[in-house]
Image (cartoon, rainbow, N blue to C red):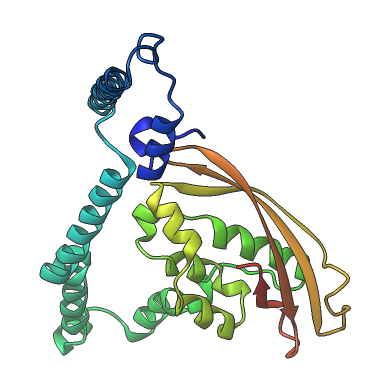
Amino acid sequence: MPKKDDERTPQEWREFLATARYPEEVTTGRRRGRRQKKREHREAVRRNTREWVREERRRDPIRPAGAVLILAVILGLGVGARWLWPGLLGAERDGAAQVTSSASATPGAQDDKPAPASSASSSPSSSPSSSAPAVDLSDPETVAEKAVRLYLTRNPPQDEEHTAPVLRAAPYMAPSLVENLTSHSDPAWDKLVSRGGVSSVSSVKVAPAKDDLPADSPIRVWRETTAEVDVEGYTNYSETVVYQVELTNSSGDGWHISRILGL
């Protein structure tokens, strides 16, 4: 995309002025007169350019840097609200739940209800498997596709930090890879935030890895994933992201991504 005039560097301005063509009356006459005419012509060009840039800024007052600053202020307000008013994030509900549980534990509250009925009604809600989402780890291609799709689907205003998409893809990754990704910064995330973007994945293709990677074995395989990512922000664009991923199944409980090449 071509640069606007207000985004030229000083060196580009000097090159522009050095190659500028002057009117015919400026290049004729005596040397002193020509120099004076050239100075007046350059000042007129600068004045007209400043007026044009000022008009463009008036029409489009919000620049990308200003929008990033506004986003940072909004995120800062959210963090401050969480620190100053923990009740807004559910502390009041937790306190009410503790009061309810302590009240139900008193002898007077238990006199009206039989003990077996109470234990039977509480057993479905206490089962962790009933609320856990089903994760298919039986096929390495499926694991690679799901993990890459979740990892590249990002919404900075909602996620707040780059660790959020990592944790969404964590069920398909080895614990060591999750720890590595969450403990390091992500340049792709910073680029997305600076452009005010939200990314979504339209497709992920999984194919055999390149020949220079190890061959498949019963407990280790390499796959190449190609994701088509669409970004909506200050500028809408699409990009293709290619990863070489290693998947392992050493314990026999399912395939997990243990390494990603291309980050």
User: Residue 29 versus residue 25: which sits nearer the camera?
Assistant: 29
The x, y position of residue 209, in whole percent, is: 82, 67
- Looking at this rendering, what residue extends furthest in the left direction? 84
User: Residue 103 versus residue 7: which sits nearer the camera?
Assistant: 7
The x, y position of residue 253, in whole percent, is: 71, 84
Relative height, residue 63 to residue 155 (above, below): above
Question: Which quadrant holds the C terminus?
Answer: bottom right
Relative height, residue 224 to residue 47 (above, below): below
**Is residue 148 in view?**
yes
Relative to residue 128, is residue 208 drawn left or right? right
Residue at point 19%, 67% (across, down):
82
The x, y position of residue 110, in whole percent, is: 22, 84
- Looking at this rendering, what residue extends furthest in the front direction? 30
Relative to residue 81, is residue 228 drawn left or right? right
Q: Quadrant of residue 158?
A: bottom left
**Is residue 155 in view?**
no
User: Residue 240 versus residue 169: which sits nearer the camera?
Assistant: 240
Relative height, residue 148 to residue 253 (above, below): above
Figure disc tally: 0
Q: Quadrant of residue 210?
A: bottom right
Residue at point 54%, 39% (across, down):
237
Residue at point 48%, 64% (across, down):
187
Relative to residue 236, is residue 138 drawn left or right? right
Residue at point 66%, 78% (across, down):
259
The x, y position of residue 44, in whole percent, is: 26, 19
